[in-house]
Amino acid sequence: MNIFFAILFSIFFFLISYPFAKNLQLSGYNIAFQFTHYFDMPQQFGGKNRLMFTKRMLRTIVLYFLLLLSINLLIFLLIQQFWIIVICMVVELIVAQALFLLCALILLPFENFIKKCYVNKAKNILKNFRGIKIAITGSFGKTSTKNFLYQILKERFSVCTTPKNYNTPMGLCKTAIEFLKNDDEILIVEMGARKRGDIAELMEMLKPNYGIMTAIGEQHLETFKSVEEIKKTKYELCEHMCNGGFIVFDCSNELTCELYDKYHGEKKCCLQKQGFSYLEDLCVSPAGSRFKLHLGKKTVEIKTQIIGELILNDFVLASTMAYILGVDEQTIAKVAKKLKPFPHRLQIIETPISTIIDDSYNSNLNGAEQALKVVSMFNGQKIVITPGFIEQGERQYELNYKFGKMIASVCDELIIMNKVNQTALYMGAKAGGLKEAKIHFAKSRSTQVEILHNILQKGSVVLFENDLPDNIK
């Protein structure tokens, strides 16, 4: 009977530890971060992020269950007093998360060894790849630029690219090992960073000969601490480019323009009239965009379903790189006509009742301003659903307050998700003139749906701006 109860309680503690596993995975297996935020991490079973049962996670949860089983067998076999067993169960409940993190810590040397082997395998594949390698970095627009470039280049070349928004060393490894084929002619790699050295690590793995520098801004200020640190990190793309390399810069962005001036290798200035490429005579409507695209000495009329000035800037960067690699302007125009908005990036979804603008993958104020401009093109009631922006360091309150004011100038209703920026968004919206009765708070997805159902009118426009993982309250 004691063994039965030991197994039963082990299963119970194992099942209630699902949020611990999910939070650890969402943090990138940052054990130190989990210990630091031991008591303030969300502990829910539901939410929008599911636990991915990777090999690493499976190893961790198996070890965790064996540890729970061992502890409970000792308790139920060695302790006879009922009240002491109860106390042990309460203590085990309190330290369950610590036990899970302990298992992850025990496995860390083994996981690092596996990672090293995986990285070495990917490095060998990348070293032997004889095609063109293109690196893309910046604070904003990396994924859109990558997707545009892939769509254009595949008209002429066999192209491989990092899937979705994979932009880490492990994402590059997965791409090289699982997706890159021997007959591919071009490899496009998106590169993200949360600290100094992250871009350098990716560049040393890839060793590219072409690069694109998108717009730079106050992204991840919480970890970078300053804009200057962000610039230095992004400049690692320039410093580690093979043989000087060839880089396309978004010179409409002041910070990126500074890096353009600093770089002495081959380069092209984009999105300035005196530069190599730019757009003019832009006409945007809910149905799409029309503009003239200048590429060197060539000009071509572009018609596309893509809307939003910042996203169109990404299209110009991608078009410039494709043009340099030999894709003519008419092919670029043909691809532009076929392009559809990418999922969760100013994606317009028509429903029988309303128009939904899904911009949930945007996480910066510039992109939010662009999204609000798109919303203003539509008629009808305008609703924004957002948790605001995170990882903005000391400026987080200021930027979300400003965003709240911007929302108030365009929209009729605001639904604030999560607690993290609740006050800043509320105060900003109030300062912008939005009435208190028009500002709503949703602690969960189900509450959000209920509020939206109550306020939605036929013909409404609903903007979903940014989305946060479940480990952000």
Image: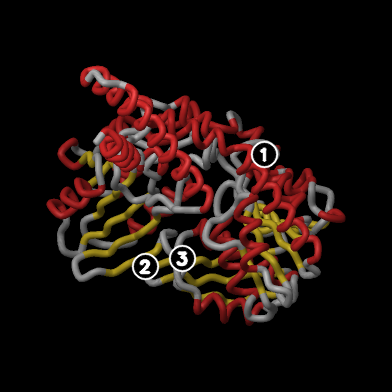
Position of residue 309 relative to residue 290, above or below, is above
Quadrant in which residue 440 is drawn: top left
CA neighbours of label 1 inside 10 A, class few (<14), some (14 to 19), many (20+)? many
Q: Earlier in the sequence, mark 2 or mark 3?
A: 2
Q: Which residue is mark 3?
A: 342
* Rendering coords of residue 390 (x, y %): 44, 37
Q: Nearer the viewer, mark 1 or mark 2?
A: 1
Q: Give the camera-side residue of 242 and 289.
A: 242
Q: Which residue is mark 1?
A: 231
Position of residue 172 relative to residue 75, above or below, is below
Q: Which residue is mark 2?
A: 286
Cα distance between the residues tagged 1 and 2: 35 Å
- Quarter the C terminus occupies: top left
The residue that appears at 41% across and 33% down in the rendered structure is 70
CA neighbours of label 3 inside 10 A, class few (<14), some (14 to 19), many (20+)? some
Q: Give the residue type at disc 1.
A: Lys
The residue that appears at 25% across and 52% down in the rendered structure is 383
Cα distance between the residues tagged 3 and 1: 27 Å
Q: Is residue 137 left or right of residue 21?
A: right
Q: Nearer the viewer, mark 2 or mark 3?
A: 3
The image's colouring method is secondary structure
Q: Give the residue type at disc 2.
A: Pro
CA neighbours of label 2 inside 10 A, class few (<14), some (14 to 19), many (20+)? some
Tell me if I can see residue 425 in this picture: no
Q: Which mark is residue 400?
A: none
> Is label 3 in contact with label 1 (beta carbons under 8 Å)?
no
SS of the residue under disc 1 = helix
Position of residue 89 relative to residue 213, above or below, is above
> Is label 2 in contact with label 3 (beta carbons under 8 Å)?
no
